[in-house]
């Protein structure tokens, strides 16, 4: 573990409110790569395309705020585990997009992962799978502890922790679920995941559950609201 606290910035984006301003900024100063544009254009659902573009523009603006304008229109690289990274690893980032909201984390210190889900989402899942997901997330020692009810809220909170941990480790959620005994065999009682990654629940709003994970985390972490309109002051830091 590192002795110095890592530099981590986390931004919550209300995509519905911010999308128009983000598109204006993108028209003024293009930041999306050709691959970003192609991926968006391939989306047949117009609303999904609008929100995805907004989340990607916001991600690139958040990165530029930390590391400068040299990344404009530079394509992200994709690691074998599926994690997007910057060329040269000049900074690390993670993004999660659900509905009309996005959570973005940027660090100049170390790889990290974030995940975001809506709280009110009914789940169709067997009791055994619920138990395994909650148990696996509980081993990551995030606070507050999950209850023993394995209700929808507990399972969603647990899932978000696992997703964030998988992103921070760069291994993909499928591999982590297998390692933690959620899928693929008998239930696992103990693993070394908690020794390799720290997980922290984030305070966002009443509608969303958010988590950040990294090798180590600072004692306090605040979620910053991404601006809805003018971005000039935000870009200046």
Image (cartoon, rainbow, N blue to C red):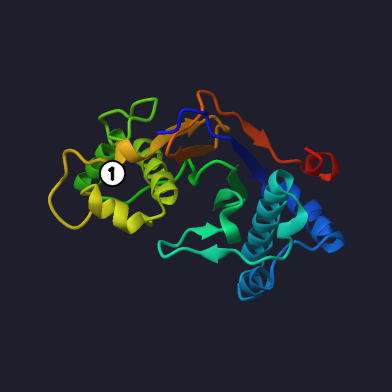
Q: Is residue 184 left or right of residue 4?
A: left
Q: Which element carries disc 1, helix, strand or loop?
A: helix
Say whether residue 86 is visible: no
Question: Dot 1 surroundings within 10 Å: few (below 14), some, or many (20 or more)?
Answer: many
* Residue 13 visible in image: yes
Q: In which quarter of the image is the N terminus?
A: top left
Residue 169, position as x, y percentages in the image: 40, 49
Left/right of residue 116 with respect to residue 29 in the rendered view: left
Q: What residue appears at the point 72 percent right and 50 percent down from the top-left corner?
A: 64
- Rendered view: 227 above or below 71: above
**Where 183 falls versus 207 (above or below)?**
below
Residue at (59, 61) in percent of width and height: 87
Residue 117, given in percent of the width and then of the height, sits at: 49, 45
Q: In which quarter of the image is residue 70?
A: bottom right
Q: Say which of 127 and 162 sits in front.
A: 162
Which is more toward the observer, 9 or 142?
A: 9
Q: Which residue occupies 30% across, 28% down? A: 147
Nearer to us in this view, 124 or 10: 10
Q: Image quarter for residue 23?
A: bottom right
In this rendering, the answer to whether 198 lies above or below 220 is below
Please report the residue visible at 45 percent of the width from the left and 33 percent of the height from the top.
2
Count every numbered label the image shows and give the total: 1
Seen from the viewer's position, the closer of residues 202 and 233 is: 233
> Residue 71 occupies which quadrant of the picture?
bottom right
Does 124 sit left or right of 218 as displayed?
Answer: left
Give the residue number, with chain letter if any, for mark 1: 133
Percent across and percent down for residue 237 are 77, 37
């Amino acid at each position: 573990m590192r002795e110095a606290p890592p530099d981590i910035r986390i931004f919550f984006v209300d995509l519905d409110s911010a999308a128009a301003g983000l598109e204006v900024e993108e028209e003024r100063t293009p930041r999306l790569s050709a691959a970003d544009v192609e991926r968006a254009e391939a989306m047949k659902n117009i609303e999904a395309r609008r929100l995805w573009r907004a989340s990607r523009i916001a991600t690139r603006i958040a990165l530029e705020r930390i590391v400068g304008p040299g990344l404009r229109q530079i394509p992200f690289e994709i690691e074998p585990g599926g994690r997007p990274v910057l060329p040269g690893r000049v900074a690390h980032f993670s993004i999660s997009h659900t509905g009309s909201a996005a959570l973005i984390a940027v660090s100049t210190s170390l790889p990290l992962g974030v995940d975001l889900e809506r709280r009110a989402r009914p789940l169709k899942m067997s009791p055994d799978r619920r138990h395994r997901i909650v148990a696996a997330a509980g081993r990551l020692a995030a606070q507050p502890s999950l209850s023993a009810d394995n209700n929808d809220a507990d399972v969603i909170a647990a899932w978000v922790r696992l997703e964030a941990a998988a992103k921070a480790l760069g291994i993909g959620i499928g591999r982590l679920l297998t390692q933690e005994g959620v899928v693929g065999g008998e239930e696992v009682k103990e693993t070394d995941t908690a020794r390799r990654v720290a997980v922290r629940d984030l305070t966002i709003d009443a509608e969303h559950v958010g988590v950040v994970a990294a090798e180590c985390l600072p004692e306090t972490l605040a979620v910053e609201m991404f601006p809805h309109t003018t971005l000039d002051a935000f870009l200046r830091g």
